[in-house]
Image (cartoon, rainbow, N blue to C red):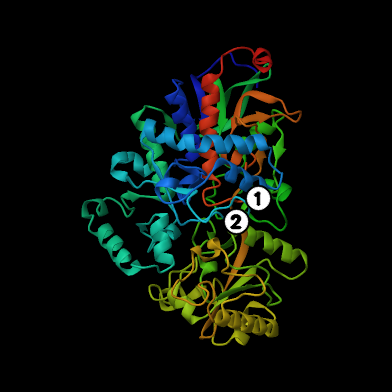
Amino acid sequence: MNDSKQWDAEYDVVVVGSGGGGMTAALVAHGHGLKSVVVEKSDKYGGTSAVSGGGIWIPCNDDIARTGGSDSYEEALTYLKHVTGGEVPQARIEAYLQNAPEMVRYLARTFDVKYANVPKYPDYYPKAPGGKEGWRSMQPAAFDAKQLGEEFDNQRESFKGTLLMGRIAMDQIEAHTLFSRGPGWIGLTLKMVFKYWLDIGWRLKTHRDRRQVLGQGMVSALRYAMMRNDVPLQLQTGLESLVEENGRVTGVVVSQNGRTLRYRARRGVVLACGGFESNPQMREQYLAKPTKVEWTAAPPINHGDGIRAGSALGARLRHMDLVWGSPTVSKPGAAQQITLFVERGMPGCVAVNKKGVRFVNEAAAYPDFRNAMYEDDAKGNGCIPAWLIFDATFRYKYPMGIFLPGQIEPDSKLPKDWLDKVYYRADSLETLSQKIGVDTQNLLRTVAKMNEYARTGVDTEFHKGETAIDTYYSDPSVKPNTCLGPIVKPPFYAVPMWPGEIGTKGGLDVDENARVLREDGSAIEGLYAIGNTSAAVMGPTYAGAGSTLGPAMTFGYVAARDMAQAQEKPAASRAAA
């Protein structure tokens, strides 16, 4: 659109999308003296960030030395160059590593949005050159939702799977202690339960925990900072198109409660409105087959609006076939699938294909697990769905995505119509294999092998339990390998797993300043993209916990700073500068 004679409102910066990256961009722009606004098409703010773990992957963060670790720019660069395999321009990697720690410092000192590192959370490939067995992942500080007042009601709620008993907030360190049944886990559970229920005044208002952590803590803190600094947020305001004049983006056209409005953006527009995991047409066009919207673990809100708007102006697309992959399971009544982050590392389970054969290290990083499903299925082994098999001991002790441990939520408390539809159960492996259509003899041989691995502590096939990321979510009481336990006690269970994702990672190609690039490599002046609207700086990999939100917030910071430093002058003169 080129007719810009009439504007309904004027800002320096218009940010499309209210996730962690978008709100960071708006706040940093405000901190540099620019008038910014965040527009969000949903009636809830927070986007996918609000339902996430809230972690950010920040090499060389200031907490590392304080918590007993060490890191260096050179090590981090070596690691990212290795795991991205040359698929990402080094200038973008360097921009991320240089600006990520400063972004954390800036938010803390300017807006009191604070993070602390999680010392024991390893990189996803800790044995790779430059990899670390902890310290680089950070989590948001706990936030008291009371500070938000009525605005808290407009925040997207967290998934129940990230809450203790579906109600009580737990941060990453607490979750690690509880799920791995670490020292003091029973006392911690009781403390959290009592604290939640004794908050009587808050309990009379809402079921939601006043103590906000993970993605809720991130989004709450950013939104509160926006409120204190009068940075406006407009809900139910969706992007329709970008306004372009003489090769420069100068504003947006949005739809707000049935009205079409035009907002001028004097310095630039930041597209931070997610990927395209809820768009069936784009999934079919770009992602590996088979693919279904129903398999995603992301909330049904991201349809590729920003990617399509940028593409309409000639933007180059990159990494469109890639996702932040994860195996997911289906829970009736849930708006999206549930990702198996924790369960696969617990001892006493095995993942098999239709032939009853293992195809991957069950405890592998979730994108690797999802990729292995596609690779094995392409060989004709019937790996979509794959099956996670476990016994009564596992069922009693550990969670399984769709239900809590049996000691808390026994089968008798599950809906009766779930049996042999959502999960499968039988008194023998032979009967179980027949119910799920898996080769019986192969399954028996596979389980026998796993039982031998549990006895010796050595998985000679896929080396489960040999890295820090494997054992992060495991059971330290199980020896000799905390990831390996026997599968012997009936009844036996099976749950189908699908190749899902927590988001797509392909999008608009950008440079080291988050400026959107055309096919010829030139920048579209005034247009920036961050988060899953942009092509991921992680390329084909997942470096560690927080590899989605860390770059989203960092390049939101970078984009805002770039706009603050820019002068309002014709695109041609800026390009020549």
Residue type for callout 1: Val
As drawn, the label of residue 326 is: none
In which quadrant of the rendered image does the N terminus lie? top right
Residue 357 sits in which quadrant? bottom right
Towards the viewer: 244 or 352: 352
Q: Is residue 246 visible?
A: yes
Is the C-beta separation of discs 1 and 2 under 8 Å? yes
Number of callouts: 2
| Left or right of residue 383, residue 98 in this image | left
Residue 2 rendering spot, x and y as whole percentages: 65, 18
Marked residue nearer the N-terminal end (1 or 2) = 1
| Left or right of residue 409, residue 451 in this image | right
Residue 340 rendering spot, x and y as whole percentages: 54, 63
As drawn, the label of residue 83 is: 1
Residue 516 rendering spot, x and y as whole percentages: 65, 30
Q: Which residue is mark 2?
A: 125
Residue 109 rendering spot, x and y as whole percentages: 37, 32
Q: Is residue 278 visible?
A: no
Q: Is residue 34 above or below residue 499?
A: above
Residue 447 sits in which quadrant? bottom right
Q: CA distance from mark 1 to mark 2?
A: 8 Å
Could you tell me which residue is drawn at 32 percent across and 53 percent down? 209
In which quadrant of the rendered image does the C terminus lie? top right
